[in-house]
Each structure stands twice: as C-alpha cells, then as structure tokens.
Amino acid sequence: MSGEPASPEPATPKPANPEAASDTPASGEPAVEVIDNRRTPCAIGLIRAARRVQELAPATRVDILSKDRFAPMEVPIWAERDGHRLLGHGREGVWPGRYWRFELEVRGDDAAA
C-alpha cells in the first residue's frame, strides 16, 4: 500500500469498423475475423469481403454473414476460385432476420492465386 489511488482499468478499444471485428476466444484458438454483410446490398457484400480477406494473414479464420439470397452460390465459388478453404455454411437467426454464415480459412501463400 503506497497510499496512491488505484488507476482505473483502461477501456477496451472498439474496432474502427464494427462490421469487420475479430473475436478472440479465451481458449487459445486463433482469432476469427467477422465480416458482417447483413446490411450490405448483394454483390457489394462479396466485393467487400474479398477486399478484407486480401488483407488478412494466411490461415486466418473468417466468418462472413450475409442476407443475400445468392450468397450460398456466390461465396463458395469465390472461395474456391481464390483458393480459400470453405469450412462450412448454414442459416442462422429467425425470420425476418435470417442470414447465412460462411466459415472459411484464408489461403496460404503457397496456394494458387
């Protein structure tokens, strides 16, 4: 006890873009980048996701959220074309807020471009 007042805990900074936030699990698993395109019109969401994924390190896990009805066809084709590994996808939420979640792993440097 030094008699000095305890300094307050530093505030946790919020991501600059809340629609593209990383979740860091406490279990030591790698972080998951979440790209939330649920309010983004059709093809714009996939273009945004593609640009963001290009900035990520190889083997980063990415969850893409989308309400686009064509996403179940477009996202797997894009992922295969760019060499990313699609880990799975499915519907989540309840109507009218149902959306698609795509889980993928960013391709490594040795993958074909």
Image (cartoon, rainbow, N blue to C red):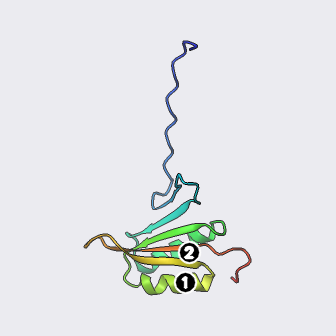
Tell me where residue 46 appears, x and y as whole percent.
49, 77
Give the residue drawn at x 56%, y 75%.
50
Quadrant of the rendering where the C terminus is positioned = bottom right
Neighbours of disc 2 within 10 Å: few (<14), some (14-19), many (20+): some
What residue would you read off at disc 2? 50
Name the image quarter holding residue 42: bottom left
Residue 107 in the figure: left or right of residue 10: right
Per the image, label 1 sits on a secondary structure element best described as helix
* Secondary structure type for disc 2: helix
The earlier-in-sequence mark between 1 and 2 is: 2
Residue 81 left/right relative to 5: right
Question: Looking at this rendering, what residue extends furthest in the front direction?
Answer: 27
**Farthest left residue?**
95
The residue labelled by disc 1 is 78
21 relative to 10, above or below: below
Across and down, in percent, residue 21 comes to 50, 58
